[in-house]
Image (cartoon, rainbow, N blue to C red):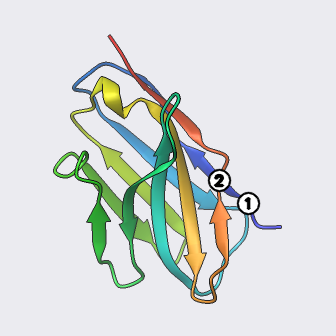
Amino acid sequence: QVQLVESGGGLVQPGGSLRLSCAASRHIFGIDAMGWYRQGPGEQRELVAVITSTGVTNYADSVKGRFTISRDNAANMLYLQMNSLKPEDTAVYYCNYRTYVGINYWGKGTLVTVSS
């Protein structure tokens, strides 16, 4: 069973930065899109950013210009650079890998708390 593991979450002050990483427990073949999702307190899970196998990216309006998603295909790694963090970015962040045949892999999440 392949597992995704997120890391890099924590407590940061407003205006600060964090870099999230996602790693697979073993190599996954045929990954199409990779994405970051988040779920704030009392909210539904929402898409933060996604990157395709060709490097095309898409961001939620709320994070455009502040967050940058990137991937290392050879290493099956996914990253999210988060700058200018705001209290409303507080959430559990999940990574997702989707293969070309429609299999979805999810991590268990990493908590990001933005507070002074």
> Is 68 situated left or right of 103 in this image?
left
Label whose residue precedes the other's in the sequence (2 or 1): 1
Tell me whether circle 2 and circle 1 mark residues in contact (CB < 8 Å): yes
Label 2 element class = loop
Which corner quadrant of the image does residue 102 belong to? bottom right
Position of 74 relative to 11 (above/below): below
Between the C-alphas of marks 2 and 1, the distance is 7 Å
Residue 113 image offset from top left, x and y in percent: 44, 24
Q: Position of residue 109 (x, y in %)?
A: 60, 43
Number of callouts in the render?
2
Q: Which mark is residue 3?
A: 1
Task: Pick the quarter of the image with the C terminus.
Answer: top left
Picture layout, residue 60 above or below residue 73: above
Three-letter amino acid code at disc 1? Answer: Gln
| Image disc number at residue 107 | 2
Residue 116 lies, with reference to residue 18, above or below; the image says: above
**Residue type at mark 2?**
Gly
Reply above or below: 1 against 116. below
Residue occupying the point 42% across, 68% down: 71
Dividing the picture into quadrants, the one containing residue 1 is bottom right
Quick one: which residue is furthest to the right in this view? Answer: 1
Residue at 45% in and 71% down: 72
- For the residue pair 40 and 82, the one nearer the viewer reads as 40
Q: Position of residue 56 (x, y in %)?
A: 29, 77
Which residue is located at x 49 percent, y 51 percent?
21
Is 91 situated left or right of 28 in this image? left
Q: Residue furthest left?
A: 65
Q: Is residue 49 left or right of residue 14?
A: right
Residue 47 at what x, y percent from top left? 42, 55
